[in-house]
Image: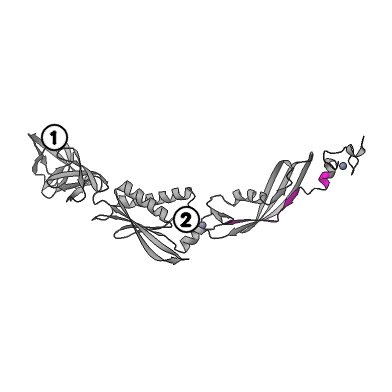
Amino acid sequence: MDIRETFCPRCGGPAGDGSDGLCGRCRLAETRWLECETRAVHTYCPSCGAWRSGRVWTDSDRGRDEVGPGLALSALRLHPEVRLPRFEVSIRELSTNRSTANIKVWGTLYGEQVSGDCRVELVWQKEQCDRCNRIAGSYFEGYVQIRASGRALTSRELQSAARIAHETECASQAEGDRLSYVSDLRETREGLDIVIGSQAIGLSIAQAVAQQLGGRVSTHPKLVGEKAGRSLYRVTYLVRLHQFVRDDVIAVGSADLMIASSEGDHVRAVDLSTGKSRTVRDEVPKRLIGHGSDAVEALVAYLDGGVMGMIDPESSRSIEVPHPPWLKIAAGDRVRVLRDRDRLVVLG
Ligand SMILES: [Zn+2]
Ligand SMILES: [Zn+2]
């Protein structure tokens, strides 16, 4: 029997499995199993909280308390054969840009229990991120302009367009498109101007507004200069909302119509005399009577053949209007009406 195979050459105890025959304890004694870099740096944007790894910024809402332990452990180098390592990190804040982390480590190496500790200085480094840098530099790639044909935007349209812009921004950034931001919303006499950080978000907002509020999108690029041999464009996405909105009551020829929806180049509307739906193309002349929400109630005094006798709610005088066949009503009931010059238009 070879003595080197059974005894540790260093301490004479039972040999280990390694080729040198050293027992676990003696191998351990000459192994640096725990090392620590003295500093770990976390670079973050003081404005929005995004953090940088290499050149890539990532949005995050994790605070210093949450980031600290992971940052400290990133400075730790363990021997690859350490088994079942456990850590305990305690952090002491020193200043706004410095903390100290103490890390305790336990594990098993060469069959022996090991433990140790080390100290890492955590550096909290502020740096403006790519997005905040662009916003601070008033960088933008274009506008979304919301306009209505022949009228001002309603307050509902203004609110909806602003909401759509913010929702689109949230969705873009949640997908990791950090530079798709809305840098400003400006209400102007003509409508709403949305200043956008990327052309991609401009198109998304314009399409969503046109789809939800009824209108058409046109794109107007404008050459603004050149950078590194490439032409730089700003793009305006113009959303032209329809002249009429849902529940507008309009006169088309001799018919009174209530708008149900505005689409591409036409509106869908209900003919208030027949109760039937019809479409009217944009080029057909239309006159606005009012909006359904402005209707008032009028008392039906009598029904006579195709005629309804009503009490005019303003003058209290009796007024006769045609009885729309779709309207189920009895004398003494009330109906909603809109005034159009000297007549009343019955909405139902
Ligand atoms: Zn030994
Ligand atoms: Zn930022």
- Disc 1 crowd, CA 10 A, few/some/many (<14, 14-19, 20+): few
Q: Is residue 168 left or right of residue 55?
A: left
| Quadrant (top left, top right, bottom left, bottom right) of the C terminus | top left
Residue 13 in view: no
Quadrant of the picture in which ligand 1 is shown: top right
Q: Nearer the viewer, residue 184 or 89?
A: 184
Name the residue at 42% across, 53% down: 200
Name the residue at 83% across, 44% down: 27
Q: Is residue 160 left or right of residue 127?
A: left
Front label number (1 vs 2):
2
- The residue pinned by badge 1 equals 325
Instruction: Answer with mark 1 or mark 2, whichever residue precedes in sequence.
Output: 2
* Residue 328 image position (x, y, % from top left): 16, 33
Q: Is residue 43 left or right of residue 272?
A: right
| Quadrant (top left, top right, bottom left, bottom right) of the N terminus | top right
Q: Colour scheme of this structure image?
A: one colour
Tell me how far mark 1 sits from mark 2, CA to CA.
58 Å
Q: Mark 1: which secondary structure?
A: loop
Q: Mark 2: which secondary structure?
A: loop
Q: Is residue 38 magenta?
A: yes
Image position of 142 with respect to 261: above or below: below
* Residue 263 image position (x, y, % from top left): 27, 46
Q: Are marks 1 and 2 in contact (CB under 8 Å)?
A: no
Q: Nearer the viewer, residue 71 or 343?
A: 71
What segment carries the magenta color? Answer: 27-44
Residue 226 in view: yes
Amino acid type, callout 1: Pro
Image position of 347 with respect to 59: above or below: above
- The residue pinned by badge 2 equals 179
